[in-house]
């Protein structure tokens, strides 16, 4: 690796962005954005001072008069007060004003709730500078590799005797330097206006920016169009940065120095003035150096391993399946997690959740069908007999088989999720509209889209995995019957058969088990 | 009328193209996936680790009573010291004539502990905690924040899509062919903005609805409206940045300009909510800062879309 | 069918200042005629075609298409012409049929799908109607582009370097198609810098240099005027005699 070549690539990249009449635009924009972020005081969460002094409560029974005089009666309040000795307060939380009023009652063993400061150092304004400096790199990162690739200049560079590593390190240096320069200018303003005093965080800024730029280059290493190259870092960089910072923060509760070594996250916490001192800084520097080198080496290795079409543009059955599964599970089963957490009220009703899940699957399937041009459902008019046979067969089988009940193998606390999933899989007790929606979503996705992509057996397996994870035998058999019907008589036939047995199960006609 | 039908057909074709691009679908699904996973992760974590909250006490008898009521009680000679030294987050001890409940965080577990302590001590006033029927009020601000972050995510994607739809079509010659159709040029800009809305709005609303189902978002309709307006305005800014007559034909510089303007406007709304609540984009910043957006944001967003379409029509952007 | 008079258009270039891309261009094309615009790179051919297609407004001059003033009534003029740019201009993620149908729909046809399929079949691209445009070969893309241009049966066709990037076979096929389109009575304007192509295809040609037509006539007339045997030599001779070679940066 020769320094002269690396600097030549870096200067070339920077010149291309800040050349010509409008050379000042990008740096000016960066500073115009970063400097106010560094010095502006901003506003935080809504203040609690807006709460009225006299707490609103619902009073019942013989509550002492002197206490009653300190309260404001409001029938809509979630706080109810009754009795005199003891006075019982039924409330999900106790506002400070109410606590003061209650504590003034005479003759009681006093109980004081005392606050202690958490052992948490909150990030300073500098974390915003680090994140903003990186977010501004979306465009340049898209130009750095996808842009070069689309203009065919990458091939020219690679054939000019420069090594892949030199090329990548050159590009990385250019954009790390540019982002660091902007961030340091803003940091200087921040320090000058006394919003944040200079400290270890200044040294954390380049560590985070350097690793983020390396990750950005890695993300676009196989992308060949500019729009895809801009979208991928924008989507992934902030989430990964914040996620890794969260991980580092959790680790820092016990091992602050080790936390600083967490790639990206540790450096971000140092840049945010959460982790301070020479040891965390050294660990962050080591972690950043290792992760940056690894990412740059990987990017250099994969530089000419692109298949013409960008990775961002490719789509496979796996992605669609993952999105569909996540959507269905989150809508149908997700709210059940709150029930496990002791808060069963925090969720959509089962009907709304199932309808939402069905609608989500339908949207997924329609998007996929529109993308692949398979919106034609196919309808075999001669297949009425088959439809009835399949619907009766699958319905009878499902009812006779009963549940496989793998749920027994799972811990008891998972019951609320399992119950919701089971109710949604065989949409019983729902209105016709919800049933049609759910059946349409399942048919479009599993029979029309996925069956074309991953075969009938694959689609049946996917259906079982996503819709019947706790009842796999039912899932497999019904999936195969409906899949076979779809294959031989068209997707519309499978929809009809599915709808017939769902309605039959709903009206308990076939519910023999 | 024929022109409107033609523009609708053009818009439909652009929607189809956007949907068939994997990156658009991924971008639209991403915020929902990330936020929903974060929510479920939080709830799951709470379900696993938060059901038996810990407390440090000095008295073994008190510890036994607390254990019987579902707390994990630890004994210490000086509970106050434990919490002061950040080795505990809840502690109970006697201090002269009173009981002291030391806590780091408020919340349901602390309230349960106080309720139990009041029963044990025979206090003059006691606490009955009702079973939760709605989401706890202590996630109000978090839900508010997440709704704003979702809007920010979609707005940034809107900028990329708005810029990308012109840039790509210009690059591969589609725009040149389409502009030779018998439609006023501004309709091509309007068709692109309409297509962006068709793609962004349902995805954004679905994401907010899923999160509302999981977490409960106050002022859901206000968030939906203003997040959608922000995403649309972001798309309009992206479109305007790449379709100007004097703009360079590259992608990164116009995109960076549009992104910086978007972030600056949202940031300004957060920093100056009194002003920001009147403007699209800034309105979500102002709403995050606690001020309800003003009704002017919607007409101003539509006016910006109209202005961008007219600008597209006037500029020779091929 | 097409009458162009004293057409001029200039652009602001950050490096070179004000650049006159087209300077006082005049020519006419009758129905059934194939008119070639010949010139080196940067001569102003594409700008001229873009003005004729009403994508750019001229600084001065007039363009009349089928009796319609294309400068003041661009919308009506656009329904009388079809413009095929040098880039294929096909959306990669739409099928050939969807692309042609969309243009038919925007042009106000009643059954655009049927018309599109019929056109694709007549141009030999019927088999690929449901293939994504991005997956088609360059030759097949050209057929789809022509089908898209012809969907509303326009009397004037503007083709910007229609054989760019095609192999010998594809080039022959496209030239044959253009010839047959002119045979149906359409006026065709073709821009090219490939002499042999213009020689076999065009009934008349205008040689452009630095935004002006420096010579115009049939291929024979151009050869006679320059005293050369073929159009290639005639082209070089006419360019150099006008002192335009250096200005246009030929080569």
Image (cartoon, helix red, strand yellow):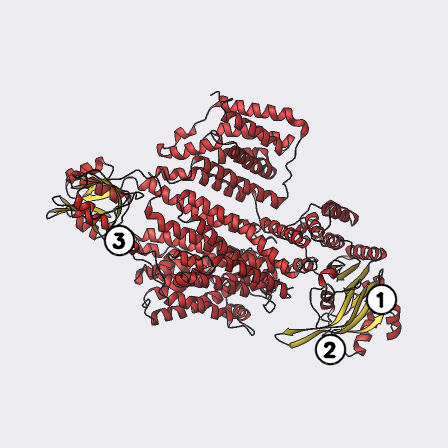
Left or right: residue B225 versus residue C117 is: left
Quarter of the image holding residue A369? top right
- How many discs mark residues in the rendered view? 3
Classify mark 2: helix, strand or loop. Answer: helix
In three-dimensional space, the C-alpha distance between marks 2 and 1, rounded to whole angstroms, equals: 26 Å
User: Which residue: 47% across, 66% down?
Assistant: A173
Q: Position of residue B317 (x, y in %)?
A: 63, 64
Q: Which residue is mark 2?
A: C246
In three-dimensional space, the C-alpha distance between marks 2 and 3, rounded to whole angstroms, equals: 77 Å
* Depicted A396 relative to depicted A492: above or below: above
Q: Which residue is mark 1?
A: C204
* Depicted C146 relative to depicted A410: above or below: below
The chain to which mark 3 is attached is A
Residue A118's label in the rendered image is 3
Q: Position of residue C150 (x, y in %)?
A: 76, 54
Q: Can you see residue A342?
A: yes
**Answer yes or no: do the residues labelled 2 and 3 have beta carbons within 8 Å?**
no
The chain to which mark 1 is attached is C
Q: Position of residue B99 (x, y in %)?
A: 15, 46
User: Depth check: C141 or A59 in front?
Assistant: A59
Residue A43's label in the rendered image is none
């Amino acid at each position: 690796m020769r320094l002269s070549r690396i600097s030549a690539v870096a200067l070339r990249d920077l010149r291309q962005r800040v050349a010509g009449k409008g050379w000042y635009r990008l740096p000016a924009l960066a500073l115009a954005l970063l400097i106010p972020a560094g010095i502006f005081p901003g506003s935080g969460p809504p203040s609690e001072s807006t709460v009225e002094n006299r707490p609103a409560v619902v009073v019942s029974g013989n509550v002492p008069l002197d206490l009653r005089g300190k309260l404001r009666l409001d029938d809509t309040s979630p706080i109810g007060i009754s009795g005199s000795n003891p006075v019982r307060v039924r409330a999900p939380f106790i506002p400070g004003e109410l606590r003061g009023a209650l504590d003034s009652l005479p003759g009681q063993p006093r109980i004081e709730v005392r606050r202690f400061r958490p052992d948490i150092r909150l990030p300073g304004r500098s974390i915003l500078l680090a994140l903003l400096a990186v977010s501004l790199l979306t465009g340049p990162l898209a130009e750095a590799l996808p842009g070069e690739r689309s203009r065919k200049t990458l091939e020219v560079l690679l054939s000019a005797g420069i090594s892949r590593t030199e090329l990548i390190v050159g590009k990385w240096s250019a954009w790390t330097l540019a982002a660091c320069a902007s961030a340091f200018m803003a940091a200087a303003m921040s320090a000058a206006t006394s919003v944040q005093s200079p400290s270890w965080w200044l040294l954390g800024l380049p560590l985070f920016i350097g690793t983020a730029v390396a990750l950005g280059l890695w993300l676009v290493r196989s992308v060949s169009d500019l729009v895809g190259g801009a979208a991928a870092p924008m989507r992934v960089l902030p989430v990964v940065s914040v996620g890794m910072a969260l991980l580092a923060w959790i680790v820092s509760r016990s091992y602050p120095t080790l936390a600083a070594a967490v790639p990206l996250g540790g450096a971000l916490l140092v840049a945010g003035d959460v982790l301070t001192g020479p040891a965390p800084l050294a660990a962050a520097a080591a972690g950043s150096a290792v992760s940056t080198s690894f990412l740059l080496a990987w990017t250099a290795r994969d530089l000419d391993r692109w298949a013409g079409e960008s990775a961002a543009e490719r789509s496979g059955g796996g992605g669609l399946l993952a999105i569909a599964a996540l959507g269905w599970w989150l809508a149908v089963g997700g709210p059940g997690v709150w029930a496990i957490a002791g808060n069963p009220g925090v969720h959509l009703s089962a009907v709304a959740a199932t309808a939402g899940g069905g609608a989500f699957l339908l949207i997924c399937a329609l998007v996929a069908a529109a993308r692949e041009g398979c919106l034609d459902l196919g309808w075999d008019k001669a297949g009425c007999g088959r439809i009835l046979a399949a619907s009766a067969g699958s319905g009878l089988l499902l009812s006779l088989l009963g549940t496989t009940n793998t749920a027994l193998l799972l811990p008891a606390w998972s019951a609320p999720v399992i119950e919701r999933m089971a109710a949604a899989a065989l949409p019983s007790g729902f209105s016709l509209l919800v049933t049609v929606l759910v059946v349409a979503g399942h048919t479009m996705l599993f029979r029309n889209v996925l069956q074309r992509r991953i075969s009938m057996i694959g689609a049946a397996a996917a259906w079982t995995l996503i819709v019947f994870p706790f009842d796999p035998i039912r899932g497999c058999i019904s999936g195969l019957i409906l899949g076979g019907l779809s294959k031989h008589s068209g997707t519309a036939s499978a929809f009809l058969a599915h709808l017939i047995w769902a309605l039959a199960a709903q009206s308990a006609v076939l519910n023999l088990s | 009328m024929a022109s409107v039908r033609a523009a609708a057909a053009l818009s439909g074709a652009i929607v189809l193209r956007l949907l068939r691009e994997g990156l658009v679908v991924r971008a639209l699904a991403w915020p929902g996936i990330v936020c929903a996973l974060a929510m479920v992760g939080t709830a799951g974590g709470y379900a696993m680790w938060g059901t038996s909250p810990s407390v440090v006490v000095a008295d073994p008898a008190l510890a036994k009573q607390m254990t019987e009521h579902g707390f994990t009680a630890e004994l210490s000679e000086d509970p106050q010291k434990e919490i002061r030294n950040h080795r505990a987050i809840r502690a109970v001890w006697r201090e002269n004539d009173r009981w002291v409940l030391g806590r780091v965080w408020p919340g349901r577990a602390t309230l349960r502990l106080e309720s139990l302590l009041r029963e044990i001590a025979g206090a003059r006033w006691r606490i009955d905690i009702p079973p939760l029927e709605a989401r706890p009020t202590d996630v109000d601000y978090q839900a508010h924040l997440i709704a704003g972050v979702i809007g920010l995510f979609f707005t940034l994607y809107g900028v990329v899509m708005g810029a990308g739809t012109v840039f790509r079509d210009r690059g591969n010659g589609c725009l040149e062919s389409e502009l030779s159709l018998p439609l006023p040029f501004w309709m091509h800009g309007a068709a692109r903005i309409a297509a962006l809305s068709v793609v962004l709005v349902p995805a954004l609303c679905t994401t907010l609805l899923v999160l509302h189902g999981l977490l409960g978002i106050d002022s859901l309709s206000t968030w939906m409206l203003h997040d959608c307006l922000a995403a649309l305005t972001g798309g309009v800014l992206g479109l305007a940045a790449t379709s100007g007559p004097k703009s360079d034909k590259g992608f990164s510089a116009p995109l960076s300009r549009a992104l910086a303007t978007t972030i600056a406007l949202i940031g300004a709304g957060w920093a100056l909510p009194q002003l920001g609540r009147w403007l699209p984009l800034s309105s979500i910043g102002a709403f995050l800062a606690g001020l309800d957006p003003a009704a002017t944001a919607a007409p101003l967003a539509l006016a910006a879309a109209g202005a961008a379409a007219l600008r597209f029509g006037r500029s020779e952007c091929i | 069918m097409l009458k162009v008079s004293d057409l001029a258009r200039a652009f602001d270039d950050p490096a070179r200042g004000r650049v006159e891309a087209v300077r006082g261009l005049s020519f006419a094309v009758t129905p059934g005629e194939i008119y070639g615009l010949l010139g080196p790179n940067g001569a102003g051919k594409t700008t001229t075609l873009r003005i004729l297609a009403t994508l750019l407004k001229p600084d001065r001059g007039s363009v009349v298409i089928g009796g319609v003033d294309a400068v003041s009534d661009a919308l009506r003029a656009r329904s009388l012409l079809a413009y095929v740019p040098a880039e294929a201009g096909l959306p990669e993620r739409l099928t050939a049929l969807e692309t042609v149908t969309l243009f038919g729909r925007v042009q106000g046809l009643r059954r655009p799908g049927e018309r599109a399929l019929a056109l694709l079949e007549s141009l030999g691209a019927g088999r690929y109607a449901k293939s994504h445009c991005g997956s088609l070969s360059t030759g097949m893309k050209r057929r789809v582009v022509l089908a898209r241009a012809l969907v509303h049966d326009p009397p004037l066709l503007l083709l910007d370097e229609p054989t760019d990037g095609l192999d010998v076979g594809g080039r022959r096929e496209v030239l044959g198609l253009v010839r047959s389109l002119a045979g149906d009575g359409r006026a065709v304007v073709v821009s090219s810098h490939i002499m042999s192509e213009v020689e076999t295809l065009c009934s008349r040609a205008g040689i452009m240099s630095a935004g002006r037509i420096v010579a115009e006539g049939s291929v024979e007339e151009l050869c006679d005027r320059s005293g050369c045997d073929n159009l290639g030599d005639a082209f070089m001779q006419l360019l150099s005699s006008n002192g335009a070679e250096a200005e246009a940066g030929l080569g």
